């Protein structure tokens, strides 16, 4: 017998990066949620993740950028990406990503507002998970239930009823909710229950990931490093003596991976005692994306919605999903926006996942070209020249400028206000009207928004030089720090502008 139903405005399945951040984004907008998580605690061993500067800007809104930094790698250390024909050989080429501190200085000296206000963060996935778990537990609007597994979903016109198993109590619980977000990873139960199918974007590229401890390997390079050799990618220096090896395998090898220590020794050419294995995971590496991110009141985010073939930077896509879904669901719960805004989630985020997949594919192609060069017997100099040409395109930390423009659908140029604060730190949780008209022309739009219950913070700006690309004297900025609308004067029809920014005219955001 199921126990009586629990009720919540939003239910989230999964407390990984996508689920945790969606819950925190909802809470940022004052919306309560229940998060059910199958596992009892965060993963013990996880891959290092590189969070880009743009994603750190989004996390800064939630107070997380500062909280995560101490757990990241030393900000004064650059990251070395070493390309080598074999694990034991000297690299043909080393790409050095500037350290977070160096980038912070570069960004501070960039006056056109295109530079992020936060540098990237390299952090162990396990430390990230622990921090996010703590943030969920201490937030009064978030009810985290671990060892609760979602097993079934029923939806009708007014809401969703999810069945969840509470492993500790051994009971079945029904949770009634207005919206359900499936953030339950690659094998998503929510996706299956909602009948949302995956579209495969390419052939499988199976690989085995081995987490192991080796002081000798971790100490081999002075900085955090990723060694890319033909038969292995080895990541070190992100978390003490923990090393992570991604080993591409054939389908036959995958079926027969018996002794991971042996496989490691073979691929890395490790002498002596077998390394201490911490965890092993096998992946099929099929790049795929959900054909739809939504059915009715049920949504997908993170790896439930998209997976890349190789262990690459997917975390930025997951962070963007969480923010994009969180603020829209909050708007729907607060009833100041409706269907069109929710529909915009899929339009924007699916397109972004396809774009990110394209970048991942390009990185994979570089690796394959490198492998062909090795197999053809090319010497170190030829390999270095070929790789050197591709380096600027393959920036795993996305250290370059985020897509900034003074147009709707893009991040606005950043600048500091007269008191020295960053613009981004003074934006409201919902919309913000940045007003350069000495407070004179913003009022009609603000009054119209208030009359409709759309929350807009008024931010008059005076006495500072504006970046050249700043788009107008009145700029309305969305909760996810994108330009929603801009003009130099009061719009003739404020209602039409508000229709646009709450999604009624979807064409507005087509370019995101
Ligand atoms: C091998 C591998 C290597 C990676 N390396 C990198 C990297 O180097 N850099 C990078 O940026 N990204 C990397 N990623 C991607 C990164 O891990 C993801 O971006 C991140 O984990 C976010 O995923 P998520 O929250 O969508 O899903 P997950 O992290 O998978 O979280 C899903 C959660 O849902 C829970 N769950 C599942 N089913 C249920 C259910 N029915 N009920 C309740 N809870 C459930 C799970 O226990 C889990 O906690 C890697 C991914 C993989 C698989």
Image (cartoon, helix red, strand yellow):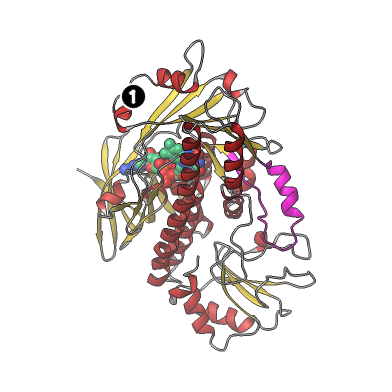
Mark 1 surroundings within 10 Å by alpha-carbon count, few (fewer than 14), some (14 through 19), many (20 or more): few
As rendered, which of 227 and 153 lies closer to the eye?
227
Residue at 39% across, 44% down: 14
Q: Quadrant of ligand 1?
A: top left
If the image is split into quadrants, where does the N terminus sit?
A: top left
Q: Residue at x 53, y 44 (%)?
A: 135
Q: Secondary structure at mark 1?
A: loop
Q: Is residue 297 left or right of residue 60?
A: left
Q: Examine the rendered structure and indicate whether residue 388 appears above or below residue 466.
A: above
**Residue 74 as seen in the image, left or right of residue 418:** left
**Span of residues in magenta:** 97-122
Residue that lies at the very extreme toward the bottom in this rendered image: 492
Q: Nearer the viewer, residue 273 or 139?
A: 273
Instruction: Check the image and report above or below for 70 versus 389.
Output: above
Q: Is residue 114 magenta?
A: yes
Name the residue carrying label 1. Answer: 257
Residue 116 position within the rendered picture, expressed as x and y whole percent measured from the top left: 65, 55
Seen from the viewer's position, the closer of residues 240 and 364 is: 364
> Residue 229, percent across and down?
51, 31
């Amino acid at each position: 017998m199921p126990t009586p139903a629990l009720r919540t405005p939003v239910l989230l399945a999964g407390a990984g990066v996508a689920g945790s951040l969606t819950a925190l984004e909802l809470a940022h907008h004052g919306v309560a949620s229940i998060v059910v998580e199958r596992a009892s605690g965060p993963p013990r061993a996880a891959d290092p993740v590189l969070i880009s500067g743009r994603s750190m800007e989004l996390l800064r809104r939630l107070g997380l950028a500062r909280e995560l930094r101490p757990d990241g790698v030393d900000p004064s250390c650059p990251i070395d990406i070493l390309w080598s024909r074999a694990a034991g050989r000297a690299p043909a080429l080393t790409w050095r990503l500037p350290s977070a501190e160096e980038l912070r200085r570069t960004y501070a000296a960039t006056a056109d507002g295109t530079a992020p206000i936060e540098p990237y963060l390299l952090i162990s996935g396990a430390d990230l998970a622990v921090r996010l778990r703590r943030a969920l537990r201490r937030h009064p609007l978030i009810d985290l239930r671990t060892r609760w597994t979602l097993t079934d979903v029923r939806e009708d016109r007014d809401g969703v009823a999810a069945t969840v198993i509470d492993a500790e109590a051994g009971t079945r619980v029904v949770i009634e909710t207005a919206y359900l977000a499936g953030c339950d990873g690659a094998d998503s139960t929510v996706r299956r229950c909602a009948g949302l199918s995956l579209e495969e974007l390419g052939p499988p590229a199976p690989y085995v990931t081995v987490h192991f401890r080796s002081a000798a390997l971790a100490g081999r390079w002075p900085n955090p490093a990723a060694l890319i050799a033909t038969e292995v990618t080895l990541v070190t220096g992100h978390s003490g003596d923990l090393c992570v090896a991604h080993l591409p395998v054939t389908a036959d090898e995958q079926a027969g991976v018996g002794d991971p220590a042996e496989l490691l020794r073979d691929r890395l050419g490790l002498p002596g005692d077998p390394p201490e294995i911490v965890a092993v995971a096998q992946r099929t590496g099929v790049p795929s994306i959900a054909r739809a991110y939504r059915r009715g009141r049920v949504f997908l985010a993170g790896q439930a919605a998209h997976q890349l073939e190789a262990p690459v930077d997917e975390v930025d896509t997951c962070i963007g999903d969480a923010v994009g879904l969180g603020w829209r669901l909050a708007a729907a719960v607060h009833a100041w926006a409706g269907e069109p805004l929710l529909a915009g989630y899929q339009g924007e985020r699916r397109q972004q996942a396809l774009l990110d997949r394209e970048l991942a594919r390009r990185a994979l192609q570089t690796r394959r070209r490198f492998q062909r060069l090795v197999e053809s017997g090319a010497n170190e100099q030829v390999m270095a020249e070929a790789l050197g040409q591709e380096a600027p395109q393959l920036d795993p930390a996305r250290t370059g400028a985020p897509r900034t423009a003074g147009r709707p659908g893009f991040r606005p140029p950043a600048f500091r206000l007269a008191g020295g604060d960053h613009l981004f730190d003074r934006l409201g949780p919902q919309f913000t009207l940045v007003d350069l008209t000495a407070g004179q022309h913003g009022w009609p739009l603000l009054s119209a928004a208030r009359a409709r219950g759309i929350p807009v913070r008024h931010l008059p700006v005076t006495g500072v030089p504006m970046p050249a690309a700043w788009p107008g004297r009145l700029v309305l900025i969305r909760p996810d720090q994108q330009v929603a609308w801009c003009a130099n004067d009061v719009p003739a029809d404020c209602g039409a502008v508000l229709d646009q920014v709450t999604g009624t005219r979807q064409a507005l955001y087509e370019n995101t």
